[in-house]
Amino acid sequence: MSYIAPQWRRRDRRLVLLHDLINHFRWRTRLTLWLTAALAGLVVAGFAVLSDQAQHAFLRLVAFNPLCAWLLPVVVPMLAVWLTRRYFPGSQGSGIPQAIAAIRLSSERQPVHQLVSLRIAVGKILVGCFGLLGGISAGREGPSVQVAASIMHAAHRWLPHGRAIRPQDLILAGSSAGIAAAFNTPLAGIVFAVEEMGRRLESRTSGVLLSTIILSGLMAISLLGNYSYFGSLHIPALSSAIVTPIIVCGIGCGLLGALFSRAMLWPQRYAGSRLWRWRAVHPVRFAGLCGLLLALMGWLSGGSSFGSGYAATSHLIDGSATLPWHAPLLRFGATLVTYFMGVPGGIFAPSLAVGAGIGNDLASWFFPLAGQHVIIALCMASFLAAVTQAPLTSAIIMMEMIDNHGMVISLMAACVLARFISARISPALYHQLSEGFMSPPARQDERPVRAQIDPPPAGP
């Protein structure tokens, strides 16, 4: 039996203890992340159920008393704005700009509790659903990004070792999981992380990102079922005749999407104008005036401009309903008015609804033989790509939502063209809006921000 010096035996014991401790930290970290990702998926799925119930309640109230179509869009947004500013500042708007700003601030070691926190997640859900009870033209997909990012960021304080995973990686993973769970599109969540949120995917982030998206998606499926957002769209084999509709849809939606983005930036670009100064002083009154415009547009559209637009878009896609030619214009205006109010609500679903209306008009006027479903799908993806300037995310979201992989090349071509047009008219919407949520030391002064509004010389 060989002799082992006592100092070596002590060293071996220390190595074993260190190895066990490291494994203990790893498994505690993994378990914390997995549980938090599952919780984020359940919360996003619950948010989807609540928002749908709120929209159905609005329709039932309007059917019970048509006067509610004029009263609720005025009163509910006023209360929602008051609640947002009083109790949940930072929860207004889409939620994606806040998540982008939080990632940037966190990487600079600055506080982000004013952008992603459990308080903001609660406000985003409660006030967002309350706003939908008033018929606002907003979706839950963008807010789901901020909600999931807030939940994942809260997990950082529960990790056994604070440096195991960076806070910005948790925010990125939560944001992507929010998109994946909201649309039931896991692949789109991964692409969204690279294209819109992170711009790059590091090896140390990929494992956290993938596990978070998978677990949150599984939890959402367990609650909502494995569904396609707009059902399954069966389209025959496409021929070379699709080239002309791709070009027309890409250019047309690119122009309109760029105009929509520039209009969304009006409060930031003209913050010193009399209108926006008055909104800053009297936000609740401003919301009431916007609500009156929203009610008027709802009356002109026959009610199709109320809500997220999911129901009207679904009926267009399955061919069970039609919309008047001016429906996309009124939805366009209703979404802008809703955003100007300052209530929690996203623009993903309304943008898809605008694109569906544009596609319905183009199919009726110019391409009656090309197939209405094809044109609607192309315009939905193209308009979303023009607004977000994220063509891959838009194409994959649309492909997974309609459960049709045969259109992937056509959708990507139209989205890239729409983004090419939009980038020469407007800056990237979410990244420009995120500047407004940066802390004062990191925020640029007014003159550079105004200069960035000019069309950038970016490539396609």
Image (tube, rainbow, N blue to C red):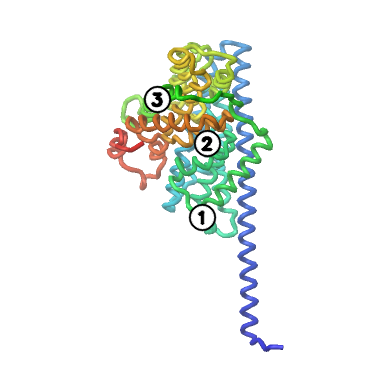
**Neighbourhood count class around disc 2 (C-alpha, 10 Å): few under 14, some 14–19, many 20 upward:** few
Mark closest to the chain's N terminus, 2 or 1: 2
Q: Count all numbered tags in the image, as a single digit.
A: 3
Q: Looking at the image, which residue is at 48% across and 52% down?
A: 202
Camera-near label (2 vs 1) is 1
Is label 2 in contact with label 1 (beta carbons under 8 Å)?
no
Q: Is residue 108 above or below residue 231?
A: below
Disc 1 residue type (three-letter): Arg
Amino acid type of the residue tagged 2 in the rendering: Tyr
> Closer to the N terminus: mark 3 or mark 2?
2
In space, the residues marked 3 and 2 are separated at their CA atoms by 47 Å
Q: Against 28, is 248 above or below? A: above
Q: Quadrant of the N terminus?
A: bottom right
Residue 204 tag number = 1
Q: Is residue 119 above or below residue 251?
A: below
- Left or right position of 438 against 88: left
Residue 247 image label: 3
> Which residue sits furthest front?
240
Q: Which mark is residue 284?
A: none
In the structure shown, which secondary structural element does the residue marked by tag 3 occupy?
helix
User: Please, what is the three-letter code of the amino acid marked with disc 3?
Assistant: Ile
Which residue is depicted at the point 43% across and 43% down?
Answer: 101
C-alpha span from label 2 to label 1? 36 Å
Query: Which numbered circle lies on residue 87?
Result: 2
Location of residue 241 (image quadrant): top left
